Amino acid sequence: MPKTFIYIFFGILLNTLTAQEDGSLIIKNTSPRTDSLLVYTQIDSIITIGIKNEAFPGAQVLVAQNDSIIFHEAFGFHTYDSIQPVALDDLYDLASVTKITGPLPAIMKLVGEGKLNLDAPFSTYWKPWKRRKDKRAITLREILAHQAGLQPYIVFLNKTLKKNGRYKKRFLRLEKSSKFSKQAYNDIFVKSRFNRKIYRIINRSKVSEDKTYRYSGLTSLLFPQLIEDITGVPYVEYLQENFYKPIGAHTLGFLPSDKNYPNKIVPTELDTLFRHSLTQGWVHDENASLLGGISGNAGLFGAATDLAKIMQLYIQYGNYKGKQILPENVVKEFTTVQFPENDNRRGLGFDKPLLGNDTLNLNDAYPAPEVSSGSFGHSGFTGTFVWADPENHLVYIFLSNRVYPSREHRKLYELNIRSAIQQVFYKALMDHSLN
């Protein structure tokens, strides 16, 4: 199996890769140790099992500790034909990891500036909800902690297709025009005002009276417009200027096909319903696609090293290279469990370990049982996963395209691959008393 790799660190690996002030990376040599080979062998074994069981054709693992990347390895290929090997600088469709790396830092910044109040009704900022009896009192805190009773997901693609699968011309066209300016794919253009239809459907969607933990990504489709309304700055520009550029995360962004990146883009699904081709360089999530590829629920692409930078920003509670980009108290609030009394593990936007996770075995835990209770992260539908552990100063990133060639491939979950790999590093840390 062809592999590209950076030899490892922790003091148990061979080299350390460190970010400089300008965002570039340097390698510091350390003494090689035989136990580094054991760590690599364990990871390689888990990944190989995944590839053989078609959990994914290839994957990438990055681990950082104390500001340094200690492990970064690429395994396998972009597809099962074994033509394009996975490379360390490949760009991935981050799927729902977008939620914590797109709208969430903006929301945290606006909360810190007093422009958003977590405990005020969301209808204070999203006016259509004032007219909805079941939504007018829902708070932003409840929404971000998935405690609001909102519907989990709405398939807006159904609104654009006929029963025979053909496009409804009032919503989708094959050529761009002033009324169809948003591009969903190479030759698919969406009605420019289709976002308003999405907003209306979300506004009218039903809310459960049972206010318990219920994951919902609906408001993530609204957040970009909300951020623009409050700041007066386009969503993408706001993210770039306030977060991605300051930390040197140059590959994080939307619509990578429009940019001249030298990086290869890992494909996702062989789509037989909507795009009728292999989806590559365009967002996999159909809802984000119908918003022109720019959304708060999905659509962000990036390389592993740039993901590590934004997770490092979070693990240091908003501080990056000595600059306080996000308020420390706000990041701490967002990464804290909000409704444990309702058996809800979630923070604000961030996922958290299962309550009592440290008492569970690997098969029942989420993520690895060894993570600290203060840790946080998020997963993505395409096979992505990021996790930060402030107590152990550890960032873990797993990137794959498990939806290739079909989203029906679920071995990534069944084999518990992401948590198993994460556990290898925690065991190494504990064995060498490095945390």
Image (cartoon, rainbow, N blue to C red):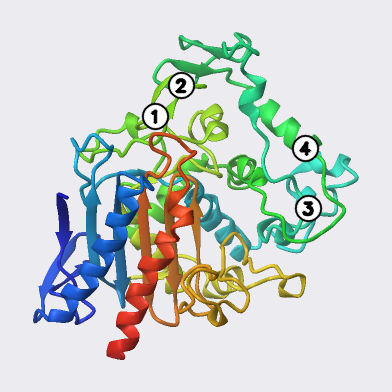
The amino acid on which the numbered mark 4 sits, given as a three-letter code, is: Asn
Report how far apart the C-alphas of labels 4 and 3 lie in the structure. 13 Å
For disc 1, the neighbor class at 10 Å (few under 14, some 14 to 19, many from 20) is: some
Q: Residue at x 24, y 43 (%)?
A: 77
- List the single residue furthest toward the bottom: 433
Q: Which residue is mark 4?
A: 203
Which comes before the other along the chain, label 1 or label 4?
4
The amino acid on which the numbered mark 1 sits, given as a three-letter code, is: Thr
x, y percent for residue 330 = 58, 70
| Residue 20 position (above or below residue 220) | below
Nearer to us in this view, 86 or 109:
86
As drawn, the label of residue 149 is: 3
Q: Nearer the viewer, mark 1 or mark 4?
A: 1
Q: Which residue is mark 1?
A: 279
Element class at badge 2: loop
For disc 2, the neighbor class at 10 Å (few under 14, some 14 to 19, many from 20) is: some
Report how far apart the C-alphas of labels 2 and 4 lie in the structure. 28 Å
Q: Is residue 351 left or right of residue 303?
A: right
Element class at badge 1: loop
Report how far apart the C-alphas of labels 3 and 2 lie in the structure. 32 Å
x, y percent for residue 366 = 53, 68
Label 4 with label 3: CB-CB less than 8 Å: no
Q: Which residue is mark 2?
A: 275
Report how far apart the C-alphas of labels 1 and 4 lie in the structure. 30 Å
Which comes before the other along the chain, label 4 or label 3?
3
